[in-house]
Image (cartoon, rainbow, N blue to C red):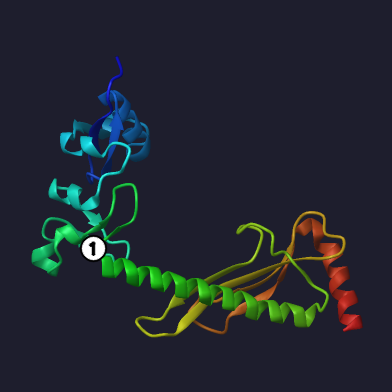
Amino acid sequence: MTIALKAYAVLEKDEYTGDVYFAKHSITAAKAGANEYGDGELGYIQCRRAKWADEFVGRGVPAKVAVDHGWNFECHGCGIRIDSDLEYERRLPVEGVVGSMHGRVYCCARCKWKHIRQEQRRKEQQQAAIEDFKAIVRARFPDVDFADDENEFRGHHASVTRLGQSSVWHRQQVIIAFRFPGMEIGPAHYRMDDHHKIGPPIAGYTCCNGDREAFEAYAAATRRTS
């Protein structure tokens, strides 16, 4: 006989953060919750049946239903607290909450749309920053081989932030990765950091220590021919 999965609410005992887990037995749910919220210690969490969530097995628990059962979330878009007082404090109906547990939760559909649009603009600004800084590298190394196929840890990267509610975006960090003759360990980078509040941004070229001689030779040869 197959035992159906049941819903269990698992919470850590300090701040009572947690999640709903589906399992055949409470101990299975408790262990999963302890690994996530209690450093693997069962004594740090509490596990209780959540019969109201049984119907959502395999589908995910809608956040608006969880709110009706005492759960609260932070809106992924605007950051406000989403709980049973949402309608009284924000004039937003709980029924309009978008998202599910285990995922992103928004206070309303409009907030989700605004967040998606902002993230699209952020990606556009990040790509624009990368292209602008590629031009700087290309001016110094005309035959540069950009490492466009590298992952985010070894390749290009741009961090941008929007200044308040304005349309101005600030470039906090831009990194351009490129290969060079004699490279053995990894790409070199042209990097700009502007996290500090005083003085101009700091920009310069870096490479792996083991590739230093090869990179310096490449830079010297390029300077002579440019």
Please identify the residue farthest to the top as the structure is shown. Answer: 1
Q: Position of residue 33 (x, y in %)?
A: 32, 35
Q: Is residue 224 above or below residue 185?
A: below
Please say whether residue 107 is visible from this viewpoint.
yes
Q: Is residue 48 above or below residue 209?
A: above
* Quadrant in which residue 174 is drawn: bottom right
Q: Position of residue 80 (x, y in %)?
A: 23, 65
Residue ID at (33%, 47%):
102
Q: How many numbered marks appear? A: 1
Residue ID at (66%, 59%):
154
Which quarter of the rendering shows the C terminus? Answer: bottom right
Q: Is residue 77 above or below residue 41?
A: below
* Amino acid type shown at disc 1: Cys
Could you tell whether 141 is left or right of 98 in the image?
right
Q: Position of residue 103 (x, y in %)?
A: 34, 51
Circle 1 packing at 10 Å, graded few (<14), some (14-19), many (20+), is: many
Which quarter of the rendering shows the N terminus? Answer: top left
Residue ID at (68%, 58%):
150
Seen from the viewer's position, the closer of residues 4 and 10 is: 4
Q: Is residue 84 above or below residue 196?
A: above
Please say whether residue 12 is visible from this viewpoint.
no
Residue ID at (20%, 53%):
64
* Quadrant in which residue 144 is drawn: bottom right
Q: Position of residue 89 (x, y in %)?
A: 11, 67
Could you tell whether 87 is left or right of 28 in the image?
left
Could you tell whether 187 is left or right of 221 in the image?
left
- Residue at label 1? 107
Please identify the residue farthest to the front as the structure is shown. Answer: 1
Classify mark 1: helix, strand or loop.
loop
Could you tell whether 220 is left or right of 42 in the image?
right
